[in-house]
Image (cartoon, rainbow, N blue to C red):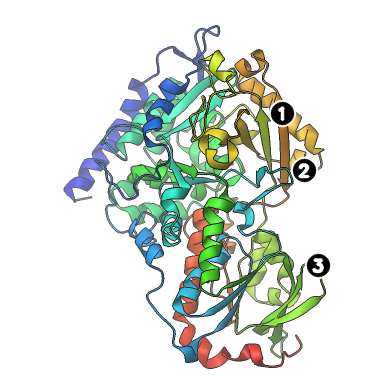
């Protein structure tokens, strides 16, 4: 803290958090019993539309991915960042690929189970380094949980809402390597918008010209309409005594404090020294649901505070981008093309049901030899490899690992992890649901609205008043494949927690979701907008549940079995379970295999040609 800039930021953080929280109370707000925002005049709610929420300013940058790595006043990491969470040079590293190239005599035959981001990124680096890779994916499309497909009527279907934070440096570098970043990403205005019942809007508006973190964040929280004065003050007290302040002057020191908070929930940490329940109900719960699909009472403090740290240090970390169209077209197909051009074979509709391996005298696995795989519904066939990577999600790896693997503590711990049930609902309307100002524009289906020109809110949206934690109108945010001439909004809503919806008829799920949409946007119901099409996708286990105390059960990518590796965002990496987490894990897995190549080539090369021994 003796560094002048560090001292400057410490003093400002300590002084400005409480001062701004009490000074910038939005006009027209009064303090409710819980301290949350409510309107003085219910007859004239603040249904702030395009001009206030910044959609107009977005028109100038439509179709642009935006620059990555730009610096504003205040943006800097003081001290070290050993985990490279905010090191934007990672983008350049991911763009260039591995620096090593294996010689022919050390070229290994590597099998990868799982064709999601983690598996494909692992294969990219290994193939670029000179290894031979083959991927096996049980679905009929690549991409894993971040994948999408087209139904028989030409509708693009997703298993979640895919949003790209500005600090997704590894993933952005991968997209640049395959030549699609500028064409694939659409930069959104720098605000996080909350839609409340009755069409009342609250926002965290980070826009502050050339002023960056932490100052734009202080301004965003101080001026938000989502919280009342009491909750703002309590927020300031808690965040002003959090690891964030340490991170402003010593980033690694702050992150160590955050990691030490994995054993308690965010609500336990937040309420311990000043935080308010009203803040969690109106703001933090929707954000927690969007990040990890569970609320503040059940999510680890580490998970939430990791994101807070990044937002507080680097302004671009909280900037959002969304796909130009579907993830399959704009993310996964370019990666698949890149891989196939480099000789990687990708087998879809290929269900791996057994890992062939040998055990020592005590019954512990000591070597993997290959897999048994059913391709296109046929009989299981044997595939042998020198090295095997399992790049699956938590339910997938738990199902595939042989029982004998649990004799190793590293694998047994995985069974403590579990996934969270999620339902993704798509609703097509005959008008523009999120347009809050111009009722004529809301019903206009005749104008040409391609490239995101349709009326409404063009950004990720949160809500504290609906069972969908986050949602977006894909016809605006991702128009290339979701906008249809003559049709209106395509809302994609993520229901979390989705336990009660798992056994429910999809039509009933869609109706409940639509009713909640009308409660958030009553003008849409008043104008007679109707749902013209719907789709529901349920995942019994999606992201792994980032509950308190789970971090210690996450396995390293390098396992106790020398020629067996793991990949996937649940494996240990310092980011949360996400597309960036999956990408980061894939790069880590490839890096460890490349580091081990001399040993693997000396001991396992040619293993794929040997006769498999019984397990």
Would you place residue 346 above or below residue 31 in this image?
below
Residue 334 coordinates in the image, percent (x, y): 52, 59
- The answer to whether 429 appears left or right of 45 in the picture is right
Name the residue that disc number 1 marks. Answer: 532
Depth-wise, is mark 1 or mark 2 nearer the camera? 1
301 up-or-down from 174: above or below: above
User: Is residue 234 visible to us here?
Assistant: no
Mark with earlier residue (1, 3): 3
Q: How crowded is mark 1: few (under 14 residues within 10 Å), some or many (20 or more)?
A: few
Which label sits on residue 271? none
* Quadrant position of residue 161: top right
In this view, the residue in front, 453 or 495, is: 453
Q: Mark 2 points at which residue?
A: 502
| SS at circle 3 | loop
Q: Where is residue 129 in the image (x, y as percent from the top left)?
A: 45, 77
Q: Residue at x 28, y 33 (%)?
A: 209
Task: Give the x, y percent position of residue 577.
Answer: 55, 54
Tell me which label, 2 or 3, sits earlier in the chain.
Answer: 3
For the residues carrying marks 2 and 3, which lies nearer the camera in this image? 3
Question: Which residue corresponds to the image point at 43% horizontal and 37% vertical from the top-left?
Answer: 188
Q: Is mark 1 on a helix, strand or loop?
A: strand
189 lies left or right of 546: left
Residue 530, quarter of the rendered image: top right
Secondary element type, mark 2: loop
How far from the left and from the top, in percent, is residue 69?
Answer: 32, 50
Q: Residue 211: name its quadrant.
A: top left
């Amino acid at each position: 803290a003796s560094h002048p800039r560090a001292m400057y930021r410490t003093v400002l953080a300590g002084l400005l958090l409480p001062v701004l929280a009490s000074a910038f109370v939005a006009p027209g707000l009064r303090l409710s019993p819980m301290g949350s925002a409510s309107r003085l005049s219910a007859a004239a709610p603040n249904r702030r539309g395009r001009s206030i929420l910044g959609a107009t300013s977005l028109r100038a940058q439509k179709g642009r991915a935006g620059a990555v790595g730009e610096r504003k006043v205040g943006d800097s990491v003081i001290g070290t960042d050993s985990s490279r969470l905010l090191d934007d040079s990672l983008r350049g590293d991911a763009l260039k690929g591995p620096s090593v190239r294996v010689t022919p005599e050390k070229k290994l035959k590597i099998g990868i189970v799982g064709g999601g981001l983690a598996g494909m990124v692992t294969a990219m680096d290994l193939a670029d380094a000179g290894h031979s890779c083959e991927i096996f994916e049980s679905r009929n499309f690549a991409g894993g949980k971040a994948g999408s497909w087209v139904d028989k009527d030409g509708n693009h279907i997703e298993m979640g809402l895919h949003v790209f934070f500005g600090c997704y440096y590894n993933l952005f570098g991968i997209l640049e390597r395959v030549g699609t970043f500028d064409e694939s990403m659409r930069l959104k205005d720098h605000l996080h918008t909350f839609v409340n019942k009755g069409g009342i809007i609250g926002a965290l508006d980070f826009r502050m010209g050339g002023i960056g973190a932490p100052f734009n964040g202080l301004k965003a929280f101080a001026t938000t309409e989502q919280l009342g004065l009491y909750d703002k003050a309590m927020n300031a007290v808690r965040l002003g005594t959090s690891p964030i302040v340490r991170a402003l002057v010593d980033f690694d020191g702050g992150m160590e404090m955050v990691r030490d908070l994995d054993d308690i929930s965010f609500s336990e940490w937040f309420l311990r020294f000043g935080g308010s329940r009203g803040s969690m109900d109106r703001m933090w719960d929707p954000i927690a649901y969007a990040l990890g699909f569970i609320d503040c009472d059940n999510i680890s403090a580490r998970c939430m505070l990791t994101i807070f740290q990044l937002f507080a240090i680097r302004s671009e970390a909280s900037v959002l981008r969304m796909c130009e169209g579907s993830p399959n077209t704009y993310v996964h197909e370019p990666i698949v093309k890149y891989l196939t051009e480099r000789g990687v074979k990708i087998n879809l509709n290929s269900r791996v049901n057994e890992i062939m391996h040998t055990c020592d005298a005590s019954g512990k696995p000591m070597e993997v030899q290959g897999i048994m795989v059913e391709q296109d519904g046929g009989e299981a066939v044997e595939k042998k490899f020198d090295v095997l990577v399992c790049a699956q999600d938590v339910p997938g790896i738990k199902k595939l690992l042989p029982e004998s693997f649990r004799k190793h503590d590293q694998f047994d711990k995985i069974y403590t992890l579990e996934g969270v049930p999620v339902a993704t609902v798509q609703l097509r309307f005959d008008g523009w649901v999120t347009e809050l100002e111009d009722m004529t524009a809301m019903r206009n289906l005749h104008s040409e609205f391609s490239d995101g020109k349709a009326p409404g809110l063009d950004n990720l949206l949160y809500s504290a008043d609906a069972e969908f934690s986050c949602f977006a109108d894909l016809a605006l945010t991702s128009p290339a494949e979701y906008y249809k001439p003559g049709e209106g909004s395509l809302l994609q809503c993520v229901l979390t927690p989705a336990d009660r919806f798992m056994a429910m008829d999809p039509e009933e799920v869609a109706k409940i979701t639509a009713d909640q949409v009308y409660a958030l946007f009553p003008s849409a119901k008043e104008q007679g907008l109707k749902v013209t099409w719907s789709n529901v996708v349920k995942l019994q286990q999606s992201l792994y549940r980032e509950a308190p105390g789970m971090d210690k059960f996450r396995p390293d990518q390098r396992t106790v079995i020398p020629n067996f590796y793991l990949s996937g965002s649940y494996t240990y990496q310092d980011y949360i379970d996400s597309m960036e987490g999956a990408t980061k894990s894939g790069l880590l897995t490839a890096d460890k295999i490349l580091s081990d190549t001399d040993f693997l080539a000396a001991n396992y090369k040619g293993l794929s040609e040997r006769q498999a021994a019984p397990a």
